[in-house]
Image (spheres, rainbow, N blue to C red):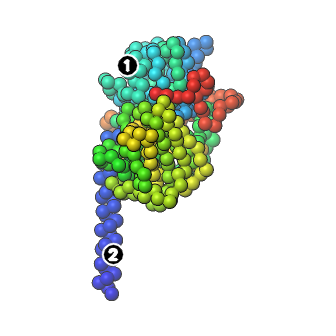
Amino acid sequence: MKTAIIASLVTAVCSTLALAAEGDQSAKQLQVFPKNFARQHLGANLFVFNPANQTFVPTEAAAAWLDDDISTGWPVTAGKQSYMIALPEPEMIANFSVSSRPAVGTVSIFAGDEPAAPGAKSWTPLAQNIPFDSINEKKLTKPFSRFAKYVLIQTDIADPGPLFSVYLYGERPAVDYSLRKRETAIDARAIFGQYVNNKTAFNLNGLYAQGRVASANSPDGFLPWQKGIDDNPESGLTINASTSESGAVISYNGTQTVSRVAVLTDGAPKGKLEFFAVNDPGQPAGAAALSLVGLVPAASIEFDGSNSRTNADFPAVQAGKLAVRWTPANATDTLTIRELNTFGALSLNDSEVGLRPEVVAGFSGGDGKDAKAIAEGPLDPKDSKGPILPIAAGPNPYLPGALGFPPNLNVQGLPNIPQTPPPPTPASP
């Protein structure tokens, strides 16, 4: 009897160690995917320069450009405009891109330590007068390296369409961050201003949220599969048609409430993309496809051969994983998913994204003695014995008091899910 008990304990311990080792290995592989800093869930905010009074003011674009939904958009203002991303803490930034409709014009990008007016000497140029379409769903061909708290984006576009997302990458991997509940709830609009979209702030598929593509009917393997959820529209996951089995499975961090999907594809051919919410524990990396026999899709999206970016809302369901099935009109057509987002009940009021505790502890050389002090505030360059490090987001997002104005809380009319305003017509890449 004792032998049987000991054997069972040994088996359980070995299984736990094996799963932990698998998780560590997965995290190491995923270090290649950088975190996008241009997200309100990290405390970033967006402003537009008003030349009339020489100030940066809140803009409706913030709710769409800085959320996690690839299908919510807001148009760039025509002509010469200056937008500014304010980060909660200085970060080492290295690359930039957008996801938008094609447009003719130019973009210039600058970095700074203070929110100075456009043209001020304090702005360091990172890329100047580059064609807009050269960064549309493509990173800059020449990366930069600059420690900055503010990023100035100057656009000059005669006839712009909607812009759906802004991407500002640094050197820190997405898996260094975690999605967590706030210690104290906040009023997000009192912090960011009116232009916040709580419903699309947190992508449950995100690598920072510990979402993973656990399986796919693509031979590429675990690491390339994550390109469908890496917050980078330049890359993607290609799946084949299937019938009784999943084409891909996204594993969540535990059981989640799911009520919305958004997807960007690479010029989707005609066909149907179905999503199945499965209320089972998540799958390990490299797990087998799921049987869909007897399952009813929570959502279904039809592609007519011209639309490549869309979304679907559905009654909230509980799920530990999301299975995807692609049924093309032409049985041989594959589908490349550039970005797949899912959303549920999480809100900026109650949740946040910050560096994982073990990452913060690593700042002090691994002993964790200075982790609490580092997490509670930015390092002062005068007190730093080494390079300034990115700091974990605190319990509250960035309050833009340093810009010389309080958020405008009297602006009305922003829809809960900001859709691309007419004109133009429904989005296409």
Neighbor class of circle 2 (other Cα within 10 Å; few <14, some 14-19, many 20+) is few
Q: Nearer the viewer, residue 289 or 394?
A: 289
**Mark 1, residue position:** 127
Q: Against 384, is 176 above or below?
A: below
Q: Against 21, is 87 above or below?
A: above
Task: Kindly report the distance in space between the C-alpha atoms of the residues bearing marks 2 and 1.
Answer: 59 Å
Q: Please tell me which residue is depicted at 45% across the width and 52% down the height of the picture.
A: 323
Residue 224 drawn at (x, y percent)? 32, 43
Q: Please tell me which residue is depicted at 57% across the width and 25% down the height of the picture.
A: 425
The dot on residue 9 is: 2
Question: In the picture provided, is 219 more to the left or to the right than 260?
Answer: left
Q: Please tell me which residue is depicted at 47% across the width and 51% down the height of the picture.
A: 322
Q: Nearer the viewer, residue 226 or 62?
A: 226
Q: Amino acid at mark 2?
A: Leu
Q: Please tell me which residue is depicted at 34% across the width and 81% down the height of the picture.
A: 5
Q: Name the residue at the front extreme.
A: 330
Residue 401 drawn at (x, y percent)? 58, 29
Q: Amino acid at mark 1?
A: Ala
The dot on residue 337 is: none
Q: Against 164, is 240 above or below?
A: below
Residue 400 seen from this side:
no
Disc 2 to disc 1: CB gap under 8 Å: no
Sequence-first disc among 2 and 1: 2
Neighbor class of circle 1 (other Cα within 10 Å; few <14, some 14-19, many 20+) is some
Q: Nearer the viewer, residue 423 or 129?
A: 423
Q: Secondary structure at mark 1?
A: strand
Residue 374 drawn at (x, y percent)? 42, 43
Residue 409 seen from this side:
yes
Q: Secondary structure at mark 2?
A: helix
